[in-house]
Every structure is written in C-alpha cells, then in structure tokens.
C-alpha cells in the first residue's frame, strides 16, 4: 500500500485524532474568550490649549497639560481673541496616558487618531479641499520629574474632509461639522512610560497655510493600544505553539528522509508551510518587552504575509498534484502561472507596507493617505493586489473543478482497474476530498468569526462570565490555522506501513512492480513510463 | 449676573447634599473624602450651566423659554412642580453635568477616571495595563448621579419622577453617542479593528431631549391604591407605574400652566416683550410660526422695531484669534410681542382672525 498516513489509518484512529484536535480548537477559543481582555483599548484625549508666552520660540520647551509645571491655559478661543494671542502661540498639548497611569511595553504599539471639532460659521466656512498643516512634536520620559526628550518632530499635512449635515443657516452656527477621522501617529513599540504631544496649527496668510480651515474649537485624539493582558495571553499561546509545530516538523522531515526516494514537490511544499507557520509562531515579541524595537509591527506584517502566500501556494500545488490527468508535474516551475499572482500580489502589499509602516519607523506621523500622490499610489498597490487575489481564486476554482471532473471520470472506470491502481486512485480521491473539506471548514470558520467580531460590540455576557468575542476570534483562528498545519503535516506524511509491505511482499513480481511504478508516478518523480501510459489510456477508456 | 448667582446657589446646595450624603454612601469612588468633590464642583457647575444654556437655545421660540427661576432645581420650597418643562430641565441638567465631567476626564482634569470602580478586584495601574479602563462616560455618569440625584431628597412620586428624568437625560448622552472604528491589521487591513463610542456635540443631545420633551408622557398612578394610604402599597403602585415607561422617555406629573400670562409669584414670566421671528430665509416651520405662537395666540400683537446696528463685515478669519473686519451699519427689523392698544378680545376669536391673516 502506498500513500499518506491518513489513508492507512483506521477510522477509529482518525476520529480520535479529530477529537483531540477539536478539543485544542475549543481550548484556543476559550483562552481568548475567557482569560484575555479585549484585544485593544481606545482612550479619548481632549487637547489642552496652552499659550506659548515666551518671546522667542525655542524648540526645547514642552508644554504639559496638567500636573506640576503645567502650561498657561486658555479655555476657548474667545478668550484668546480678548487677550490678543496669536494662532502661532497656541499649543495643543496632550499627555499620554491620562493622570495616574503609565504606558507599558506590553501595549506593543500605539496608534493615535486625530479629530478636529470645527464649528460652522457662515462667514468662516471650510473651503473646498482644505488642508490643515500641523506642526507636531512627540516627547517621552520615564519618570514624572525628568525633562522631556524629543522623539520625533514633523510638519504634517492632513486633508479635511468634513460635511455639514444640516442647513447652512445662521441658526445653525455653532454646530459642528462631521469630519472624517484622520490618521495621526503610529508607534511600533511602547518602550516609555509617558509621552507628550505638542501640536501647533501655524497660520501664514501669504503662503496660504491653515487658511480656510474653519473655526477649530477643539482637537480630540483617540489613542489605541493593545491591551497588556491580551499581549500576555498571545505570547503564551505562541510560546506553546512553537515547539508543537517544530516537533511535528522534525518528525515529518525525518519520515521523508527515511524513504528511499527523494522528497516530491508536495511534501516539500507541506514542509515549507510548516516552516512559515513556525516563523509566525516563534515568539520574538518577547524581546519587545525588553528592547525598544519599533520595527516589530512591520516584522509581524512580513511574517504574516509570508505565511498567507505559502498557504495559498500550498492549495494550488495540492490541487495540481491531485489532478490525475497524467501530465508531468512535480516541478515548481509548472505552477508559475498560478503562483505568480500570489507572489506579485504579496510583493505589492509588501511595497505598500514598507511605504506606510516602513517610513513610520523614521517618522511616526507619516501616513501614505495624507497626500494625493500617496493615496493614488497606495490605491494602485491595493488594486493590483486585489486583481492578483481574484486571478488566484479563479485559477484555484478552475483547478478544483478540474479535479472533481477527473474524479467523476475515474469513478466510472475504477471497478475495471487492477487492485493496486484502484487503491491508488481511491487514496488520491480520499486525500483530496479530506483536505478540501477541512480547508473549507477552516475558511468558513474564519469568515464567520470575522463577521461576528465586526458586527458584534466586542463582548457577550453569559451569566457571570464576560466572553470577549474579539479576543476569542484572534486566539481561536490563530489556533485553528496552527492545528490545520499540524494536521496536514501529521496526516499527509508518508505512511511507514508501506515499507513493511514492501519488505514482506518484495517478491510479488509484476504486481509489486506496478505498485512501485504507481507510487512514483503519483508523485511524478520521473516522466510517465510506458506502463503508466498504457494503463492511463486504459483508465481513460 | 442672574445665572451666576443661581448656579452658585445650585452648586452649593448640591455640594451640601453630597457632603451630607457621604455619611451613608458606600460607593467606592466617593470614599476618598470631601476633597475629591471639590475637584468636581467646578465641572459640575459648568455642566449645569451648559445644560441650561442649551435649554435656552432649544426653547428660544417657545412660550416657555427656560427662564432662570429659583423654582427650577431648588428642592426646599414646596412650590416646585413636575411639569413637562421641568422634566426637560432636569434631564438637560443631568446630561450637562455628565457631559462636562466626561469631557474634562479626557482633558486629564481628574486623577481617577474610570479605573477605580469598574473592574472589581483589579485596582489601579495593573488593571489599566491588563485590560484598560472603562470608558470616561461611565465615570461622568456616576459622578453626575451622585451630584444631581442627591438633590432629590424626597421619597414621593415627585422625587421619583425627577430622578427618572435625570436618568433619561443621562441616557440621552449614551443614546446619541457615535461609534467610530479604525482598522489596523496587516497593511492597515480590517483584520483587526478597534471601535469606540464618542460623545456627540451637546447640541445633538439637546435636539434629542427636545424631541423627548415633545413626546413626554404624563405619569399616572393607580389612584385607588394611592388613596388607600398605605405607604408600602403606595411604593408598589409607583413601581408598577414606572415599569410601563421606558427609561429614555421623559415624564411629568402636572399639566403645564399657561405660559402666556405673567405671574411672578409662581415663576411665570409671560410672553409679553419676547422676540419672535416672522420672515426670513432658511427658517423652519417652527420658527416661522413663532410670532403666532408667542404673540397672537397669547393675545398680544406683534410689534415691529427697526434698529440700526453696527456689525462687522468682510471679515478675514483664521482658525483662531485674529479677525480683521470692516464695520458696517445695517438696519435690522425685529419683531416683539406687545400689549394691544385696544381693549383685549378673547384669544379664541383672535386666533381665527390671525389664521386668515396668515394665509
């Protein structure tokens, strides 16, 4: 008997394996749902309006919104008009986090969203295509008394896309415009305890800077970071999953090297899938707790991208190797047409990511969406990646269709075949259908949970328990794909029963000859032989 | 000058109530002592003031225009009523206090927004690092409850109605909150997204509560059970009656008095001398009919006054602080309700005549 473990396993054993995997699956959902808090927290900040009272603007001075050494504040801009304060002397100060709290490396990243409160005034409306020019500085310190140390300083432009929902009449003066959220800042590691943002909106009438942006009343920021509890649970999960996938990988490769023939393409691809899974799993994030590695966010993106590309390639090659149409494959080059779009699409997304998160390593306030050219470029990358994804799915669907067509073709001729040939084809069909089913189930689960987590408010109350749906989604889906890779490596490893059979039935003559020939032709190590061609034709008839 | 005195007195009375309440209050976040309140009082004061300002805006063209009478929120004299209008005052004041506290929390005015009482068993910084703190709005709600609801010391149906309206006002903030989301997954995709609720502008809350005011229900209890006199029975009847009313709805006990005529002893100022709108672009129907509502229907006539005003024009604005304007003089026509010269006719016939006139 030839083929993978899955064919040679008894149904009972297969069920046991399935139940164990299912238990782990449930466990991974529960870990996220019951132990972890929600994945992220959004904190609201309202900027304090400080007045720069010094005659000359020195760059070193930082303005604190509260606490000791707080700045001179104004309540609103009417007060500023009375006091003859100029726009360039007003500094919006935001301290992250709020009083009596401190940031922690467990937060992993920090995103800040900017929102302007712009009041409608008949005589001072927002002009078409208005752009706000923001002079922003970011500083940090690790205790409450030392000086602020500058981390970044930049002059950024953000397009205001605001609309006024009610009638533009004098009665509605003072109502706020509805403005889109603006991306403001993204930091890939939270190594310091306290952060301070100082924002200025300098006005220069000659250069048309900050003219026609309406009457800004307030600046609101929303700071988003990953919850420390979620990070801990996530790290724990990664630390647990890494050795499990690593062990099965070693076991799998040992099995392949034990065989007399060299490994075939499909086996290599499965092994590569394991490697990319391990690459994601390895908990290098532990270092981010100790070191200030801002590139961790980008690195995480790259790791995920590699895994997705690998998974998509695996599906294509798996289908191709089960086509049963007697064409020679088993070479990676045969699949260039199908794998090409994946590689190209991933590359596009990689470039896009480098343009956004890569540049953010240098300037945390950078956003590719802030400029027109950047937006077009970003859209171009995303559209190309989208086209590649569509192409890929067309190819995949076509291949799956071909496989099913060939399966139904083979079905009719199965009884007429010799035993070995029949077993070979039955095995192929079973392996394909099994993987197809499992893959579809996993994909469906991912999609369903994704939709639930998008629609849902984040947590369900179940009696006394609060179930964090979003956390459950992340840990559950992550666990699921790990189990998927684990199961594939385990079940699709070459069966050792074959060797036993080979040794004991070594003198079976023609029959065993055909058997060996088949095992090699399934996997297409060498070109189709005469026998294969003959029997193939016979089968087609 | 008027509002300042009023609100100072209101806040002082609030503080006194809260201070006296500490003796029996077991709420965690108030256990820190009276000093903690002092940090909130200015916010509470500003919030109540903001609420009344919004009330004035909302009722600008109504017969009752949210006058500052000591009757509104004071609890000591027996004159207080529970009309449709006072229900709005209670709701908007409670909402204003909650709104300001929530906002000032985001500024960083308070040391302990949200982190102390919401996550039981996990205190201070560790809870913050593990799972973040609860929303600022919960903090605002709790403090607003402590301050505003403490004014209601009675246990009668009137107190219950007022407390219900306070609660409805606070719920209005939560109902009008807007949900925003940000995607930040791989390459900025939506595989991970964070959503949060954001306060809407206080004007929107005012609009929402005005709508609730227009739909306010009269609170009626089972009269027979009330008459039985048994206090336990009484409370049961009250609970029964409250169970049928949604928590977001405003309720009142008494029908509104006639706001046309002046009667200062019961806190009615009348509509004589009020401004109204008659013609002009972009007026809503409610505004266009304000003269009929305030003047004609009340038996006053509409008086036209032309005034020359100096206003700024051709202004050049920046987002802040500098405005360069020219001065222009304009003749502005305003309309006011005034006493009729002739002997008063009954208002019913007046109404008919005016309707013809309007058409």
Image (cartoon, coloured by chain):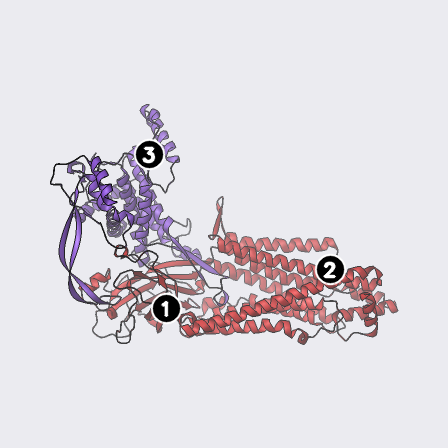
Chain colours: A red, B purple
Q: Which chain carries label 1?
A: A
Report the front residue among B247 and B58: B58
Q: How far apart are marks 3 and 2 (CA)?
A: 71 Å
Crowding near the residue tagged with mark 1, few <14, some 14–19, many ≥20 C-alpha atoms within 10 Å:
some
- Discs 1 and 2 share one subunit: yes
The residue indicated by pointer 1 is: A159
Could you tell me which secondary element the residue under label 2 belongs to?
Answer: helix
Q: Mark 2 points at which residue?
A: A430
Residue B126 against residue B11 in the figure, above or below: below
Would you say residue B129 is visible in this rendering?
no
Count of numbered circles on the image: 3
Q: Which of marks 1 and 2 is in front?
A: 1
Q: Do the residues labelled 1 and 3 touch (CB within 8 Å)?
A: no
Label 3 residue SS = loop
- Name the residue that disc number 3 marks: B219
Asked if residue B241 is positioned above or below residue B47 in the image, the reply reads above
Q: Going from the N terminus, do you reach mark 1 or mark 2 first?
A: 1
Image-based side of B19 in relation to A227, left or right: left
Quadrant placement of the C terminus of chain B: top left
Residue for point 33% across, 57% down:
B106
State the residue in front, A253 or A455: A455
**Chain ID at mark 3:** B
Q: Residue A467 at x, y = what percent?
A: 50, 50
Mark 3, other Cα within 10 Å: few <14 / some 14–19 / many ≥20? some
Q: Nearer the viewer, residue B289 or A474?
A: B289
Say which element carries label 1: strand
């Amino acid at each position: 008997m030839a083929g993978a473990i899955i064919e040679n396993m008894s149904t009972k054993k297969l069920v046991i394996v399935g139940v164990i995997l299912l238990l782990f699956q449930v466990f991974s959902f529960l870990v996220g749902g019951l132990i972890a808090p929600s994945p992220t927290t959004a904190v609201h900040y309202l900027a304090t309006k400080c007045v720069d009272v010094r005659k000359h603007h020195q760059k070193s001075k930082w303005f604190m919104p509260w606490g000791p050494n707080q700045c001179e504040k104004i309540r609103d801009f009417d007060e500023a008009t009375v006091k003859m304060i100029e726009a360039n002397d007003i500094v919006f100060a935001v301290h992250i986090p709020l009083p009596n709290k401190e940031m922690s490396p467990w937060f992993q990243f920090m995103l800040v969203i900017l929102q302007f409160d712009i009041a409608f005034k008949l005589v001072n409306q927002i002009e078409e295509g208005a752009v706000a020019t923001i002079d922003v500085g970011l500083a940090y310190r690790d205790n409450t008394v030392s000086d602020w140390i500058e981390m970044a300083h930049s002059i950024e432009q953000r397009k205001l896309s605001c609309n006024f929902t009610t009638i533009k009449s004098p009665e509605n003066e003072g109502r706020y415009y509805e403005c889109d959220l603006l991306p403001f800042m993204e930091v890939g590691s939270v190594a310091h305890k306290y952060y301070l943002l100082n924002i200025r909106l300098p006005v220069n009438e000659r250069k048309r800077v900050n003219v026609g942006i309406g009457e800004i009343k307030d600046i609101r920021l929303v700071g988003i970071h990953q919850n420390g509890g979620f990070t801990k649970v996530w790290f724990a999960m990664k630390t647990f999953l890494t050795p499990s996938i690593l062990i099965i990988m070693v076991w799998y490769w040992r099995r392949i090297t034990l065989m007399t023939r060299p490994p075939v393409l499909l086996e290599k691809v499965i092994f590569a899938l394991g490697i990319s899974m391990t690459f994601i799993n390895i908990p290098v994030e532990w270092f981010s707790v100790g070191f200030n590695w801002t590139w961790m966010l980008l690195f995480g993106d790259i790791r995920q991208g590699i895994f997705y590309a690998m998974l998509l390639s695996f599906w294509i090659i798996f289908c191709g190797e089960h086509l049963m149409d007697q064409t020679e494959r088993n070479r990676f080059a045969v699949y260039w047409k199908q794998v090409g779009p994946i590689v190209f699409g991933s590359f596009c997304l990689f470039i896009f990511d480098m343009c956004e998160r890569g540049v953010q390593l240098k300037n945390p306030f950078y956003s590719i969406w802030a400029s027109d050219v950047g937006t077009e470029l970003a859209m171009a990358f995303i559209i190309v990646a989208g086209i590649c994804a569509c192409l890929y799915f067309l190819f995949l669907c076509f291949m799956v269709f071909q496989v099913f067509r060939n399966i139904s073709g083979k079905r009719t001729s199965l009884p007429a075949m010799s035993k070995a040939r029949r077993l070979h084809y039955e095995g192929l069909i079973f392996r394909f259908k099994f993987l197809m089913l499992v893959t579809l189930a996993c994909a469906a689960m991912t999609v369903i949970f994704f939709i639930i987590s998008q629609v849902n408010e984040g947590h369900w109350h179940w009696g006394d328990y609060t179930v964090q749906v979003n956390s459950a989604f992340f840990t559950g889906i992550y666990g699921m794909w790990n189990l998927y890779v684990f199961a594939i490596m385990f079940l699709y490893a070459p069966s050792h029963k074959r060797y036993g059979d080979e040794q004991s039935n070594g003198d079976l003559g023609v029959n065993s000859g055909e058997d060996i020939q088949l095992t090699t032709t399934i996997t297409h190590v060498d070109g189709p032989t005469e026998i294969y061609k003959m029997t193939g034709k016979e089968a087609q008839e | 000058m008027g509002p300042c005195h009023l609100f100072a007195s209101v806040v002082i009375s609030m503080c006194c109530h809260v201070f006296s309440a500490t003796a029996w209050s077991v709420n965690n976040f108030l256990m820190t002592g009276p000093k903690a309140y002092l940090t909130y009082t200015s916010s509470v004061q500003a919030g109540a003031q903001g609420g009344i300002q919004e009330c004035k805006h909302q009722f600008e063209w109504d017969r009752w225009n949210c006058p500052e009478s000591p009757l509104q929120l004071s609890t000591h004299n027996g004159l207080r009523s529970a009309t449709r209008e006072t229900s709005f005052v209670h709701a908007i004041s409670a909402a204003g206090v909650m709104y300001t506290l929530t906002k000032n929390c985001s500024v960083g005015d308070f040391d302990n927004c949200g982190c102390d009482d919401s996550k039981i068993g996990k205190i201070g910084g560790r809870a913050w690092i593990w799972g973040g703190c609860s929303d600022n709005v919960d903090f605002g709600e709790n403090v607003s409850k402590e301050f505003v609801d403490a004014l209601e010391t009675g246990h009668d149906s009137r107190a219950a109605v007022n407390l219900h309206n306070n609660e409805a006002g606070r719920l209005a903030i939560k109902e009008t909150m807007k949900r925003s989301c940000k995607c930040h997954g791989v390459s900025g995709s939506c595989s991970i997204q964070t959503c949060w609720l954001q306060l809407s502008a206080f004007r929107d809350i005012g609009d929402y509560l005005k709508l609730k005011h227009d739909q306010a229900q009269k609170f009626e209890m089972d009269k027979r059970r009330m008459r039985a006199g048994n206090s336990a029975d009484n409370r049961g009847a009250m609970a029964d009656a409250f169970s049928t009313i949604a928590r977001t709805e405003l309720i009142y006990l008494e029908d509104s008095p006639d706001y046309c005529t002046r009667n200062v002893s019961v806190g009615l100022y009348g509509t004589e001398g009020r401004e109204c709108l008659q013609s002009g672009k972009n007026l809503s129907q409610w505004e266009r009919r304000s003269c009929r509502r305030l003047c004609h229907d009340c038996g006053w006539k509409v008086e036209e006054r032309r005034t020359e005003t100096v206003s700024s024009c051709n202004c050049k604005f920046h987002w802040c602080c500098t405005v360069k304007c020219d001065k222009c003089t304009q003749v502005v026509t305003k309309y006011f309700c005034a006493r009729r010269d002739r002997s008063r006719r009954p208002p019913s016939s007046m109404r008919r005549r005016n309707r013809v006139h309007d058409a």
